[in-house]
Image (spheres, coloured by chain):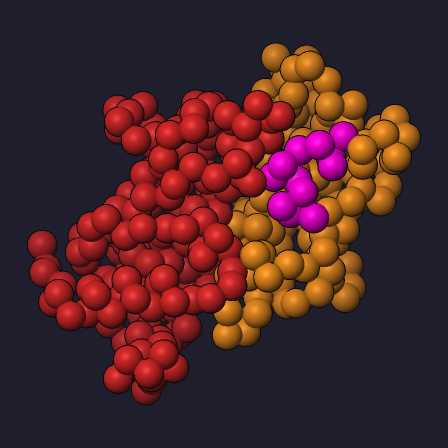
Amino acid sequence: MTRIPQQKMDQIAQLWNARGEGLITHMALDIQKVSTEGVLVRMPFNSDFCVDSDQTLLHGGILTALLDSVFGLANFIAIEGVSTMATLDLRVDYLRPAHSRADIFVRAHCYRQTRHIAFNSGSIWFDGHEDEEIARGAATFALTRGETSLYEAMLEGKGLK
Amino acid sequence: MNLQAVNANISRVPFFRFLKFEIREIGELQAEAEMTFDQRHIGNPVMEYYHGGIIASFMEAVSAIAVRPDFADTPAKPINLTVDYLRPGVKGPLHARATITRKGKRMASVSVITWQTARDKPIAEGLYHFLLV
């Protein structure tokens, strides 16, 4: 397992949390563990994402959105010199009803990268129920590589460099 | 099922209010909807593109409504989905049309397409399976 320097990890967490308005900000994601082998992210319960009036059942779509976001983060960390990244396709299986008000954990990793494509897989469970996955997903991303990496550009944009 | 009743049901679902969409047309085998852009839908803050997960959520919501427009006691349970992202979704309204490919007693397959300026320039296409029991 390749270790990520603490400074880079701190910068990634700072960039992630400083995105301003947007879905990722609204999901209030908290990065728990990061390495080139994969990432672990926590999402607190949010009643905006529920489908029922009791607000105990999450809509599947938010699980899909969560996987898409965390795949992006995993690629950002695992792949050197990426300048842009776009989801090409996404497949999700809903394994159990997402019936809980517990926080959610997502684990995702980039299991293969080529010059143009990144391949990802990941899974989701409720806090304390890692053996009862609620969703599993896989995606491919189209990458462009260039002089300015996304990471460097974001650092400069945020005045962190 | 009239549009007014369907949209009244939509307004009672917290996540559907978050997505901010309205059903514009509903038939035996299809549903068409329009989603309003919101800051909270953004995936790429620099370009102000829709988050891919919001597009997938919108397609899932419209598909489920096509299958169960009456919001029956047994809602259509999503089994899985496949989404093909074709173009970035830019700031502005997003349209979706869900077409039921097959609806049996237990299962339904729905194909969905989303677009912005022109139907023949799709933003994303999706295929959704639902369990009806």
Q: Which quarter of the image is occupied by the C terminus of chain A?
A: bottom left
Q: Which residue extends farthest bottom?
A: A147
- Magenta-highlighted residues: B9-20
Residue B36 lies, with reference to residue A80, above or below; the image says: above
The residue that appears at 51% across and 63% down in the rendered structure is A21
The residue that appears at 43% across and 66% down in the rendered structure is A19
Q: Which chain is orange?
A: B
Seen from the viewer's position, the closer of residues B54 and A101 is: A101
Q: Is residue A139 visible?
A: no
The residue that appears at 19% across and 69% down in the rendered structure is A8
The residue that appears at 73% across and 47% down in the rendered structure is B21
| Left or right of B94, for residue A48 | left
The answer to which image quadrant residue A159 occupies is bottom left
Q: Which quarter of the image is occupied by the N terminus of chain A?
A: bottom left
Seen from the viewer's position, the closer of residues B17 and A95 is: B17
- Magenta span: predominant SS is helix
Pinpoint residue A94: horizontal percent, then vertical percent: 46, 30
Picture colour for chain A: red
Residue B27 is inside the magenta segment = no
